[in-house]
Amino acid sequence: MPDLRNHSLGSWWPQQSPIDLRNTLYCPELPTLKIKYPKVLHGTVEEHNLLIHQPTTACVQYHGQNCPLLKLHFHTPSEHLIDGTPALFEVHFVHKIPAFVESHSSAYLVLGVLMEARRPTASAAARGPVEQFSLNRMLAEKWTEPGENGTACIRTAGLLPPPAQCGDYYRYEGSLTTPPYDELVSWVVLRNRGSLDHPHEVQLENETHHDARPIQPLARRFVLRNFAR
């Protein structure tokens, strides 16, 4: 399948991602978002993804279905914009929708979380320069277990806003943002951003992230939100 990053929108590609989340519609009927992740996710590093060990208890409840987490990865800068504003980077949690084909048109539920770095505190700044931050070292207590090359675990507390700030979200139908760009994704993007507690520059290691795909046309889609302005 061709790379559509610089391709004009054709009639056969009406629902590409990412998009700018603006001019959204308030929809109080949207269900409550229930993120059920353990404190630590275990998986295997493969290219840019952490593939979650299956079976897993990590899931998002979506329209009455428990959608298990398949993998997570990072994009820098953020792929989605909120009212035209990007974030430093974005985490994508990719879940399987069990009722795909039978009762739902999307195969994947992807939870997007925009992330920023906190400003340094006075005490942190006084300590002087530190080596540039590595996403692996900050978010992941990552190690290779004996006999299991590439095995890693990531603390979920470092990947999400505080629980009280995880309820507000945007919702739209779209696509994968990496090849083959299949339009089989129900997107949920959190309104509130996560933050990294580190005093200096954030640098994503080459092997842990995807570059950001350019913003795609909204076309005839609607973007819903479950919160009032």
Image (spheres, rainbow, N blue to C red):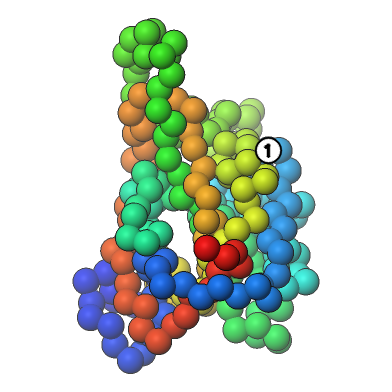
Name the residue tied to disc 1.
40
Residue lying farthest bottom? 11
Residue toward you, 219 or 147: 219
Q: Residue 211 at what x, y percent from top left?
A: 32, 52
Please name the residue shown 49% across and 37% down the image: 195
What residue appears at the point 42 percent right and 40 percent down from the top-left corner?
A: 116
Expressed as whole percent of the image width and height from the top left, the position of residue 17 reads 40, 70
With respect to residue 198, does 102 lie above or below? below
- Three-letter amino acid code at the position of disc 1: Val
Q: Secondary structure at mark 1?
A: strand
Q: Position of residue 21 (x, y in %)?
A: 42, 66
**Vertically, is 218 above or below 108?**
below
Quadrant the N terminus occupies: bottom left
Of residues 169 and 77, the one drawn nearer to the viewer in this rendering: 169
Mark 1 surroundings: few (<14), some (14-19) or many (≥20) residues within 10 A: some
In the picture, residue 111 is in which quadrant?
Answer: bottom right
Measuring 32% from the left and 72% from the top, which residue is drawn there? 216
Question: Quick check: 170 left or right of 59?
Answer: left
Query: In the depicted view, which residue is nearer to us: 90 or 218?
Result: 218
Left or right? Give the position of 217 relative to 53.
left
Which residue occupies 65% across, 56% down? Answer: 167
Residue 162 located left or right of residue 132: right
